Amino acid sequence: MRRYIADRDWLTVVLLPPYAPDLNPVEGIWSVLRPPAVPDLEVHRIP
């Protein structure tokens, strides 16, 4: 990948942190707004 990037002068790569709640304050709200995980509720009926 580094060779691919180095061969292209027009390409700029910026490394970003994988998780940065300080840069995006909305991250803390998602845990409150996101509904809890719901298991698969498919109902099987026997004829």
Image (cartoon, rainbow, N blue to C red):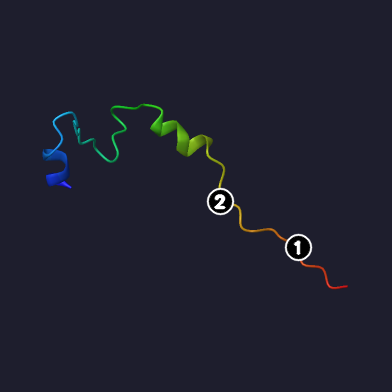
Secondary structure of residue under mark 2: loop
Q: Find residue 18 and report its image quarter.
A: top left
Which label's residue is closer to the chain start, 1 or 2?
2
Q: Residue at x 60, y 52 (%)?
A: 38
Q: Residue at x 12, y 46 (%)?
A: 3
Q: Which mark is residue 16?
A: none
Could you say which is closer to the camera, residue 41 or residue 32?
41
Mark 1 Cα within 10 Å, few/some/many (few <14, many 20+)?
A: few
Residue farthest to the right?
47
Residue carrying label 1: 43
Give the answer, above or below, for where 46 lies relative to 3. Answer: below
Q: Is residue 7 left or right of residue 43?
A: left
Secondary structure of residue under mark 1: loop
Give the answer, above or below, for where 38 lies relative to 32. Answer: below
Give the answer, above or below, for where 23 lies relative to 19. Answer: above
Q: Which mark is residue 37?
A: 2
Q: How many numbered marks are there?
A: 2
Per the model, the C-alpha gap separating discs 1 and 2 is: 18 Å
- The amino acid on which the numbered mark 2 sits, given as a three-letter code, is Ala
Where does the image place residue 7, in percent across and percent down from the top left? 12, 39
Q: Find residue 11 and report its image quarter.
A: top left
Could you say which is closer to the camera, residue 12 or residue 4?
4
Give the answer, above or below, for where 22 lies relative to 42. Answer: above
Mark 2 Cα within 10 Å, few/some/many (few <14, many 20+)?
A: few
Could you say which is closer to the camera, residue 36 or residue 43?
43
Nearer the camera: disc 1 or disc 2: 1
Where does the image place residue 30, in percent across and percent down from the top left? 46, 35
Q: Is residue 41 left or right of residue 1?
A: right
- The amino acid on which the numbered mark 1 sits, given as a three-letter code, is Val
